[in-house]
Image (cartoon, rainbow, N blue to C red):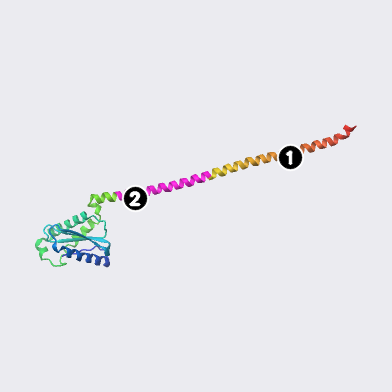
Amino acid sequence: LATCYDKSVVNEEKKGFEGALASVLDRAKSAYPGWRDRIQCPECDGLLFAFADPQALCLLVVGVRDVQYPERVAVQLLREVADKVRNSQGDEVLMEAKSGSLSKPLRKILSDLMRTYNDAGAHDKTTEVREKVDELKGIMQDNVKKILETHVTLESLENSSSSMSSQANKFLRQSVDLRRQVQFRNLKIKAIFGTCVGAVVLYIAMPFLNF
């Protein structure tokens, strides 16, 4: 009786949903009050949910792009659509209406409900909790990633510090060795100088010692 698509839907998605809808209608030939069904739509990567109102007067179908969309929320949407359609049009109009004749009168109602149920978490506590858990999980993963990055940075700093400390110790040992070499060389120079002075004094003193 009425159809309403999201403005962002493309022709390929529309064809996919229409093909899945034909399968649902074929399976709904033996529908009874409160009948439910769900069918996948591989072409549009989504699902179709079907629901027959309590009087089995109307068959309502909604297609979603999210394969994780909760069925209980989809059924809640379809129940609300059924109530609003019956209240706005009445049973007589629904029974006499032809295919597609109510698309225009029901466009605003359907569009508003589509927008309202776009966020499943707003109508389902389980979905809301799951979304919060996923959000918390993402925050925890980010924190773990930061901790790991910080740990790597600390390890890098520790390695750099250890390397600098090793280089400083090596430089200190080299400095000590160099100082000892300089001291030993100065001692050798002093010894040579003292020997030379002693030799000169002895040379000068030799004539006097012979006399």
What amino acid type is highlighted by mark number 1? Ile
Q: For this rendering, which residue is in front, 173 or 77?
A: 173
* Magenta stretch: includes residue 202: no
Residue designated by label 2: 138
Q: For numbered disc 1, what is the local secondary structure?
A: helix
Instruction: Give x and y (percent) for residue 140.
Output: 35, 47
Q: Position of residue 28 (x, y in %)?
A: 16, 63
Q: Which secondary structure is most common in the magenta stretch?
A: helix
Q: Residue at x 78, y 37 (%)?
A: 195
Determine the image quadrant of residue 48.
bottom left
Q: In the rendered image of this protein, does residue 163 appear above or below residue 2? A: above
Query: Local crowd at mark 1 within 10 Å, few (<14), some, or many (≥20)?
Result: few
State the image coordinates of residue 168 (x, y, percent, origin top left).
57, 43
Left or right of 42 on screen, residue 104: left
Marked residue nearer the N-terminal end (2 or 1) = 2
- Is 47 in front, or is 143? 47
**For residue 192, which quarter of the picture?**
top right
Q: Residue at x 50, y 46 (%)?
A: 159
Which quadrant is the C terminus positioned in?
top right
Report whether 210 appears left or right of 160: right
In the rendered image, the vertical position of residue 92 relative to residue 197, given as above or below: below
**Magenta region:** 133-162
Farthest left residue in view: 92
Question: Can see residue 103?
Answer: no
Q: Is residue 162 visible?
A: yes
How far apart in space, not on screen, are marks 2 and 1 (Cα)?
Answer: 75 Å
Q: Nearer the viewer, residue 52 or 115?
A: 52
Kindly indicate the quadrant of the structure image that contains residue 189: top right
Give residue 43's mark.
Answer: none
**Mark 2: which secondary structure?**
helix
Q: Name the amino acid, label 2.
A: Gly
Kindly identify which numbered label has been placed on residue 189. 1
